[in-house]
Amino acid sequence: MNTAVNDDNIVLKLLNVESAYGPIKAIRGVSLQVKKGEIATVLGSNGAGKTTILKTISGIIDPRKGSVEFKGQNITAMDPALIVQSGLMHVPEGREVFPLLSIRDNLLMGAFTRNDRDGVARDMEVVFNYFPILRERAAQDAGLLSGGQQQMLAISRALMANPDLILLDEPSLGLSPKLTKEIFEIVVRINRERGTTILLVEQNANMALNASDYGYVLENGRIVMEDTCARLREKDDIKEFYLGMKEEGVRADRRWKKKKTWR
Ligand SMILES: Nc1ncnc2c1ncn2[C@@H]1O[C@H](COP(=O)(O)OP(=O)(O)OP(=O)(O)O)[C@@H](O)[C@H]1O
């Protein structure tokens, strides 16, 4: 773990977190941390437990064991509304925009914890500049937007809270490669221009590793590897199993025999 970091710089810290659905243990002793101002990513295939990590952080699921700290405060199993108020926004898998509300009203829902009208108006301009299509269609029902546009709206709704940390669940889900690239570019701009810390979970390892600073690899509910994304991209197992790059000399018909070593 990147423990060499001063604690003041750690926005989010999970320690030995275990969460389950009845008898199904979805995450088993997950420890991770996210530094202020960085984009961190959790990579993992279907069912690895990525969404469960995010739901546990934002209070939707109470963990069976372990703790979650946000900005130095213990938020383990805290009421999700209080977690939002403390500056943590969750962009869920599948976006979950309010389909019968206008785009503008969806954005205002994101700002429901704020009283500073001028600040809210300024941030509405900020999101319209990131995603001009939302300005053009501001009066329309959100349900009429395409999947990619709904993803833009979901990210923008989170930004309207002016959060310290955004949890982003699989933004590439169901999107074309072109749209995925566009959305990732804006996510990086948001991080660089506004200093918003982001924890991103993704199956699209290529996109996530390019956009992020630090990465964790999750398999069957356990973190099996972590490092800077620059270094993760160079690891053989990441190249082979996450980036789809075939190792020299490994015959296609034998590839299934190769085991992950996580070294
Ligand atoms: N509501 C639920 N009830 C029972 N089991 C669940 C529930 N949600 C998730 N699981 C199980 O928990 C495990 C982790 O699921 P999770 O959704 O966190 O994985 P994931 O890595 O986000 O997968 P994906 O990339 O497919 O979204 C899986 O075995 C899944 O079947």
Image (cartoon, rainbow, N blue to C red):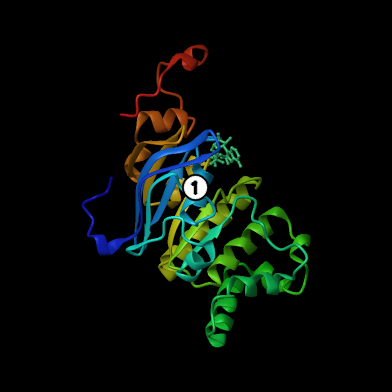
> Where's residue 92, x and y in %?
59, 54
Which sits in the foreground, 62 or 42?
62
Which sits in the foreground, 85 or 116?
85
**Image vertical order of residue 61 relative to residue 103, above or below:** above
Q: Amino acid at mark 1?
A: Val
Residue at the location (59% across, 70% down)? 110
The answer to whether residue 91 of the structure is visible from this angle is yes
> Where's residue 81, x and y in %?
54, 66
Mark 1 lies on residue:
201
**Image vertical order of residue 35 relative to residue 256, above or below:** below
Instruction: Give left or right: position of 248 versus 98.
Output: left
**Image vertical order of residue 84 relative to residue 38, above or below:** below
| Mark 1 within 8 Å of ligand 1, using the beta carbon | yes
Which sits in the foreground, 94 or 175?
94
Q: Quadrant of residue 259?
A: top left
Crowding around mark 1 (Cα neighbors within 10 Å: few <14, some 14 to 19, many 20+) is many
Quadrant position of ligand 1? top right
Instruction: Give left or right: position of 110 versus 257.
Output: right
> Where's residue 10, x and y in %?
31, 59
Q: Quadrant of residue 140?
A: bottom right
Which sits in the foreground, 142 or 116?
116
